[in-house]
Amino acid sequence: MKLNILAAICMLLATSHVYAEVESNSTSQDSAYVSDDLTIFIHTGPSRNYRISGTIIAGTQLEILANSEDNSFSQVKTQDNKSGWIESQYISRKTGQKQQIAQLSQSLETTKSELIKVQENLNQEASDNQALKQDLAKSEQTLADTTARLNQTQLQLTALQTERNSELENVRMDWLVKGGILSLGSLLLGFALAFMPRRKKRSSEWA
């Protein structure tokens, strides 16, 4: 029974480091990702003047093939061999926040399940053998440390969700402002065209 508790604690400690491993893996790979909450147009060349050949959704993993002279555009290829040029400002070297949040949520659920198992084993040990009080105290300390890590992971998850919501709101406001400017320009152009004097056709002198 004591070996079962130690095994469960070891598994629990391993799961508590999932977030750190995710961050390490995402930065060690020579990959890039499309920024969150965006759908990016793929162009056939390194500027907006080139024809649009498709789109890439947020979180898509990319391979960077080349950069334009001013680094404003990057030539990329997706895992399904879709290639073209996209604006470099929409490329991130880190895994998207959606993926990080999903991984953290899964890690939290796993850790909670392991905590329940450890607590159940601790309770069973306490009732089965009074002589294991000393080992039980050590296990309880390990449980407290793991709970602290769980709380820290929860704080990280909350901070990520807050940051993601803020970025999403900024993106929405940016598109709203751009749409308003475009609509206003179209309206002013329409008024200008409506009030422009039209040229009258001159009658022939021989008519």
Image (spheres, rainbow, N blue to C red):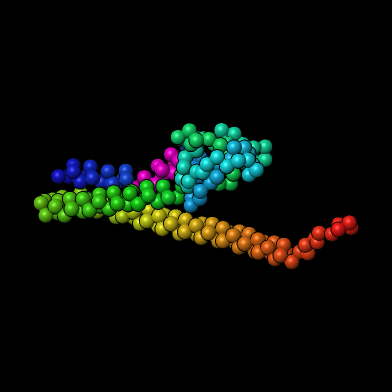
Left or right of 185? Residue 165 is left
- Nearest the viewer among 184 and 170 is 184
Name the side, left or right, on which 187 lies relative to 145.
right
Residue 136 shows up from this direction = no
- Looking at the image, which residue is at 63% across and 59% down? 182
Would you say 106 lies left or right of 3 here? right
Quarter that holds the C terminus: bottom right
Depth check: give the residue in front, 157 or 37: 37
Span shown in magenta: 16-27
Residue drawn where x is 76% and y is 64% of the image: 196
- The question of residue 21 being in magenta is answered with yes
The answer to whether residue 16 is visible is: yes
What secondary structure is the magenta-colored segment mainly?
helix
Residue drawn at point x = 23 percent, y = 42 percent = 7
Residue 22 falls in image quadrant: top left
Q: Which image quarter is the N terminus in? A: top left
Quadrant of the rendered image containing residue 178:
bottom right
- Residue furthest toward the front? 207
List x then y, in percent, for residue 191. 70, 66
**70 left or right of 97?**
right
Q: Nearer the viewer, residue 187 or 16?
A: 187
Q: Residue at x 28, y 46 (%)?
A: 12
Image coords of residue 85 (percent x, y): 58, 39
Say if 189 sits above or below 117 in the image.
below
On the image, the x and y values in percent for residue 45 come to 62, 37
Residue 14's spot in the image, x, y percent?
32, 43
